[in-house]
Each structure stands twice: as C-alpha cells, then as structure tokens.
Image: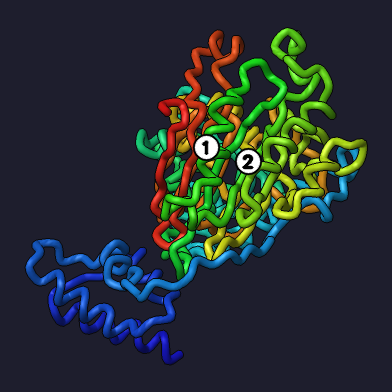
Amino acid sequence: MALQNEVFSALSYATSKGFQIHPDAFAMLKGLDIDVLKTVQEIVKAKKQSKNSVILVDDIKSQIGPKKEEAVPAEQVCSILMDPTPKVNTGEGVEGYAFLFRSRFEKTMRILAQRPNSKRISKVAAVKQNMRNKPQFEKGERGLHGGAGSTIVAGLLMSKRTKKNGLELAIDDYTGIMTAMVVNEDTKKQAASLAMDSMVMLELENGKGVPGMAVKSIMTPDIPDHLPNRSKSESYAVLISDMHVGSKYFMEAEFLKFIEWLSSTDDDIVRKIKFLCIGGDLIDGIGIFPNQDKELIEMDAVKQMSHVTKLLAKVPKHIKMLIIPGNHDPGRRALPQPAIPKKDSFGDHLYGLENCTMLGNPAFVELNGVKLLMYHGQSLDDVIATTPGLSYSKPAEAMKVLLKARHLSPIYGERTPVAPEQEDMMVITEVPDIFHSGHVHVVDIQSYRSTLVVNSGAWQAQTRFQQTMGIMPTPGIAILVNLATLQPFLHDFTRQ
C-alpha cells in the first residue's frame, strides 16, 4: 500500500507540473523498487526544456539506468532456470496433444491475467449463450459485464479466413469455439501477423453491417517493456550457432580463427569473456534431408560429434560453454528437445569437457544476473512462411512474433514437429533479457521492448538448398554481448 501511495503521489506531482505519465511508464513505475516520487521529480526537472510533456518509459530508463561504478572483477555465475531434459514426459496420440494444448491455454491465460482488461474476459460459451438469450447484445447495446457495447474473450487462434466482409478469426477457450470478423484495416494487419494456435484476446462489439460480432481490438500475451537485468561487472557472453560439422560447407578455418581469438591474452575484452552459448546444430547429421550424403565429408554422426568435441576442447577452460541441440543433432527432433544424448558415444566426449554444460532446447539460463533464453529456432520456418512481410533476411522480425505470442513454437501441423508433452514447455513464461536463436544462418540483431533479440548466423557457407531458396547466409560471425550494458558487438572471422 505504501508503494501504491508513493506512485500516486508521483502522478499528482507530475500533473501539478503540467506533465502526464504514459500508461506503460505508469505500469513500469509500479513494478520498480525505487524512490518513485524522487525519480519522477528528476524526470520532470530534466524534461522542462522539452516540448514533450508526457513521461515515457525511455525517460524512466534513462533516469535509473546503470550508474558508473568502480571497476570490479568480472563474475562467472551461471544458473539454469529451465531445462526441458529432465521434464520430458511425452503423452500419446490425441489425448497427449489435448494435455499439451490445455497446458498452453492455462499458462498463457496466467500471463494475460496480468493485463488490466483481463477481469473482463468472458468464456466463449457464456458469450454465445448470452447472445442467444439476449439478442440486444448482438446489437451492441451492452457487453456481457455491462461494458458499453463490447465484451472480451480469450482463446487459442484456430483459424484465419479471408471473407467478403473482412478477415474471420476463430478462437477456442475449451468452453466452445466462436468466430468474429475483423473489418478495420489496421486491425486486419495486426490479425494477419498473429501466429496460429497462439493465445489471443479479442474485444468484440456489434457487427455493424457484418453477421455476428466484429473485432474492435486484438491483444496478445506479448512481453512488457521492462528494465532488463544487467551484470554488476563488465563480462561478456559470446553467442554462436549452426556449426554443421561434417558438412563440406563447414567453415573450419574460420572457426579455428574464432577459437584462437578466444584464447588470446592481449585483448581486454576477450579476457572478460565468461560464457560461450551455442544454439544448436553442432553437426550436419545423417539423413536429415534427401541426398545429404552428397554434401558430407564425414558420413558417420559419431565421427561428426567427435570432431566437434576436438574443436570445442580448444576453448579456454575459464570460458563456460552452454550447448543446446538443433534439428540436425542426435536425439529426438520434436520440440522440446532433451539435451544431446550421452549414450551411444554421441555426446559422450562433450559431456567430459569440464567447462561444458549440455542443455535441452529451449533452455533458460541466468548469466551473471542476465536472463538468456536459448532456442535453436526450428519454428522460425513456419512463422516466416505464414506471416506476411517476413523473410529469411530478417529473422529477428520472426523472433519478435514468438515474443508477442509468448510461445516458441505456436504453429502446429506445419514443418516443426511438436511432441505431445504433458506440459507445454515452449511457453515463454518469464521475460528474457536476451533472446538467442539460430537455425536460419543469418545474423540479425534487434531490440524489442528492451529484450535483446539475436539470431547468431552460422559457421556453414551457403548450401545448394539455400541457393535454390534464395537465402544468403552470413556465416563466420560471433556475437559478443556485454552483460553489464547488453550492448552487442559483431566479430567477423571471414575478413581476417
């Protein structure tokens, strides 16, 4: 209650000085453990010379951002927050998928419950029953809970169909399925970018010339704008993926330059590298795609893994390696993937490296206080194929779709295999400070709502398949992230 009073005191102060606080900024202030009134006073003081009288999220970030402190030794603290490996418990058939999608629904509903409008959410069955019993509701006189002309429903998106009157959406909340029409052009663009089988919240109103209900607005679970965690000392994580050892296109010379660089002792930044995060596809595998043998120089997956181990054994022992599997690696290919199996000599030698931690896909870790979500990225194929305007040249845009859906593989039934787990471990329950993927072999870095979004490219030159698809990879590049500032840097080993 004391914090709430402090926030409203800050709001009153800002208003008295002729300023407004943006709703997103207001929500952020309520979640911060700071002197809210003093912070707002400092922001108002700083903005007096500006014509903008609205206090924004960026104003708060700039005011309470990291302060310069005395240098302290770089830390190396790694915590595993989520690893699917010990939790895999696959169900069977239709019943197994029923458990999976119910888990997805319940976990994302808990995320939506944090939204201001969540208290207005009505069950689909109740809305449909109300429409049958009270035809005036369909005419938009009042919403189910007394809202003027609108009501809100939430459910998994089952279909998107282009109709004469607009774009028809169908959602399912386990009490029933209902459809609603999107007629507004801006809302249609938003609806077109929604991932199938993901959770959506729809505000519905009178159809106004179209049968049934019309969609007034669309809300997704999305990640909130937030203040990302930062390391207390200057330390670095290196993000790479998609080595594809065993392929004749593997760029071994460039990768060895990378390893040599990690071992250098005369570079201040290199000496502060504490983590190497590898996002899957260590090897090219065997039988992953038709006629793969024509592109391999090592025809045995065990030998490919042995080659990987010899390379990674050269990484300095003070650098901790975190490795997740990709769709080319040994083990099951359906998501979520357990860690590369230790048995049958596949990962045996990797497990023997003292500075190596093998994790499943996806994995959520904390590096010196910074929360990193590692996901190989198989579902990016489906997102790019089904979302207007996306392409392989900008994979971070597809990664943002996953963050908005709060799910790493929302689309069921396309190219990405999904296992019928009892729990949907692909839901993004906690907001990451860094979201790291690979799979598409194109480096792309963006920031979305203060989460650093990184696709780390590959160490494999352009393949024949990529040529036919018009995909131009950007291989041989390592991404460094300063964990104290979340500032990314690119180091290109193809130009040395």
Q: Nearer the viewer, residue 20 or 145?
A: 20
Residue 257 lies, with reference to residue 10, above or below; the image says: above
Q: Are marks 1 and 2 in contact (CB under 8 Å)?
A: yes
Residue 238 lies, with reference to residue 327, above or below; the image says: below
Question: Tag 1, which secondary structure?
Answer: strand
Q: Nearer the viewer, residue 46 or 281?
A: 281
Farthest residue toward the front? 266
Q: Nearer the viewer, residue 322 or 37?
A: 322
Residue found 47% across the figure and 31% down from its top: 493
Q: The C terminus appears in which quarter of the rendering?
A: top left
Location of residue 256 by image quarter: top right
> Residue 425 in the image: x percent, y percent?
72, 51
Please name the residue that numbered disc 1 is placed on.
456
Question: Tag 2, which secondary structure?
Answer: loop
Residue type at the position of mark 1:
Ser
Residue found 75% across the figure and 30% down from its top: 307
Q: Along the horizontal axis of the image, is 139 left or right of 40?
A: right
Residue type at the position of mark 2:
Gly
Mark sitting earlier along the chain (1/2): 2
Q: Residues within 10 Å of mark 2 (few under 14, many from 20)?
A: many
Please name the residue that numbered disc 2 is placed on.
279
Q: CA distance from mark 1 to mark 2?
A: 8 Å
Farthest residue toward the bottom? 2
